[in-house]
Amino acid sequence: MKVSEFLRENGLSVGDNFRLLLRKLGFERDAYARQIEAKVGEPAKMSKSKGNTVDPEDAVKRYGADAVRLYILFAGPVEKDFEWTEEGLQGAYRFLRRLWDFTHKHLELLQPFAYSSTDFEALDGRPAQVRRKAHQTLKKYLQQMEEFSFNTAIAGIMELFNALQDFEPQGETELKVLKEALEMLLFMLYPMTPHLCEELWQKMGKEKPILFYPFPSPDERALQVQEIDLPVQVNGKLRAVIKVPVDADEELVKEIALKDPRLSQWLAEKQPRKVIHIKNKLLNLVV
């Protein structure tokens, strides 16, 4: 049995005895103890008597106040205790670093553009998906903040940021989509990391602090799904996923599927003798 398994099974931690040994040997006990605990055993509960408390000033000096705030709020539900780890704090810092770098990378492209809702009326494809993701995140965020579910709100913001990183805007309209989504992200993150968000807000060319601007509201039109990905089976086996309008009837779905080149090899130019269509969920062609 590994040392870590033994300690966990018996509810033990690398605690008082080890810290006493470090003290007698003249080592800086807290730093060594945290390293050992992270590798082999359950960390001891934070306690002044055990000398394993964390000085927030030290964490702020190393990572900044915003990273510390973000880590604490993201670590778990507010009503529960959580285990303080250096790795978690570093993760919060890395996320903010990525956001800083990503914004600066796109500053020159985004600064010239202003946008309004009319700019997004004809969106489709990937830009429409990104904008829908941004407004879906905002809608959930508003509810989560009312419920003090800060950790799930932050998780949604991080998920949105990942989507923005994967988005490669082409042309003015798509750059406006990115700018709107990024500004919404800064609004949502502002209560947790006000210093970084305010700095990025100013760098994006805003004349006033972020608090002087109205908080965004979800665009219900952006939330509406126009197309869905529909799995298509041939004789019960998945052969393709096609895009069809929401609530499309069987005839339209069948027509779109039969034109898809990925299905031609499985149909062998034969017309299906039976069609099984479950609206918005599945199309099965029997040949």
Image (cartoon, grey):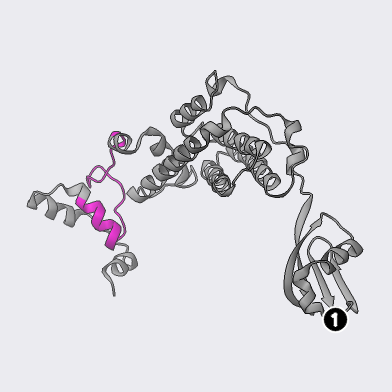
The residue nearer to you, when weighing 174 against 15, is 174
Looking at the image, residue 101 sits to the left or right of residue 20; the answer is right
Q: Please, what is the three-letter code of the amino acid marked with disc 1?
A: Val
The residue nearer to you, when weighing 33 against 184, is 184
Q: Position of residue 211 (x, y in %)?
A: 55, 22
Q: How many marks?
A: 1
Q: Position of residue 45 (x, y in %)?
A: 31, 50
The residue nearer to you, when weighing 256 against 154, is 256
**Observer able to see residue 43:** yes
Q: Residue furthest front?
A: 171
Q: Which residue is mark 1?
A: 287
Looking at the image, residue 207 sits to the left or right of residue 60; the answer is right
Looking at the image, residue 233 sits to the left or right of residue 200; the answer is right
Magenta segment, which residues? 32-57
Residue 184, above or below 80: above
Report which quarter residue 70 is drawn in.
Answer: top left
Q: Position of residue 139 (x, y in %)?
A: 66, 40
Residue at 21% over, 47% down: 30
Secondary element type, mark 1: loop
